[in-house]
Amino acid sequence: MSSFRHHSVTPPLSHSLLSPHGRLLSLHQPRVMGILNLTPDSFFAGSRVASEQDLLARAAAMLAAGAAVLDLGAYSTRPGADDIPEAEETRRLLPAVQVLRRAFPQAFISVDTFRAGVAEAAVLAGADMVNDVGGGTLDAAMFATVGRLRVPYVLMHLRGTPQTMTRLTHYDDDIVLTLLRYFRDGLAALRQAGAVDVLLDPGFGFAKTPAQSHELLRRLAELQPLGRPLLAGLSRKKMVYAPLGLSPEAALNGTTALHVVALQGGARLLRAHDVAEAHQTIQLFANTFPVGE
């Protein structure tokens, strides 16, 4: 089917991500990215930040619980979410970046945006990484922007937009092969644009049914021949709670179970609402499967 499937030599991972501000994120061991939603309509109500005081308290708690990255999002990407203007996303996001940068000068801050203009403004305000759910497909200027800024970048797989993705779950080819081709082409374009540190995110739940997301998770290791660190965003998603007949609020235990599977597949960054539990999962996994064994 593809040379990817039978690739016998995996390129060495880049174990460190360098922020344009000089901060370094080590991925020698898997780490946790804590989710901070600045939106009023995120699918998990418990992740929504209500005020500046709430933001600071949540960030402090996440860092104390073991978060290596704080991921700030000001545009809800849940299925069917409202499409807000760029000005509104910027209005929500930039003050939060500035507040966290002042309060936690050593923290590694990521911004969850698919808009190049928002990403650039956030990086100039102190953000260290761009987490793009569109993988460059929703803003043609994104790759050139992150390349010029030399900022670490998360390349995620998505079809359509957050408003249309639930109607785009049919794949003519094997889904993992489809992602391998998508990431291969995206990485080539990013290299041409000058981007250096790139992580790959399969986009669990984005233009994928729960069954497709579970297949991707089961076969996550097949993405390793691309030679880039893998980010897994599984926390409290439909693929966790729907098979159990639960709600996002009741999906912590299921999330932990799938985090273990993601770690077995080679994930280096777990994007999670519940930082302490994800960090504990990583610690126990590392005790059972030490790096290099």
Image (tube, rainbow, N blue to C red):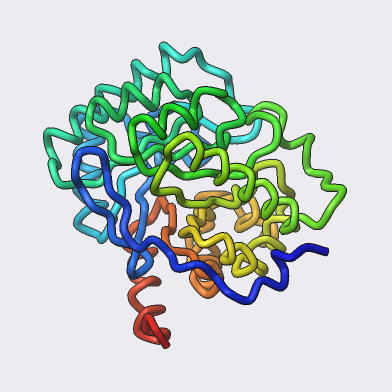
Residue found 72% across the figure and 29% down from its top: 164
Indicate left or right for 209 with 193 as reference: right
Identify which residue, 105 or 143, lies in the foreground.
143
Image coords of residue 113 (percent x, y): 45, 30
Image coords of residue 157 (percent x, y): 62, 44
- Locate residue 165: give its quadrant: top right
**View extreme (front): residue:** 192
Q: Is residue 35 above or below residue 167?
A: below
Image coords of residue 167 (percent x, y): 79, 34
Q: Is residue 272 above or below residue 131?
A: below
Image coords of residue 138 (percent x, y): 59, 26
Indicate left or right for 29 with 195 as reference: left
Residue found 41% across the figure and 34% down from its top: 147
Q: Is residue 257 visible?
A: no
Residue found 53% across the figure and 57% down from its top: 251
Q: Quadrant of the C terminus?
A: bottom left
Residue found 27% across the figure and 43% down from its top: 19
The image shows a total of numbered marks equal to 0
- Locate residue 95: give its quadrant: top left
Q: Quadrant of the N terminus?
A: bottom right
Indicate left or right for 207 with 85 as reference: right
- Locate residue 5: give its quadrant: bottom right
Indicate left or right for 25 with 180 as reference: left
Q: Is residue 184 visible?
A: yes
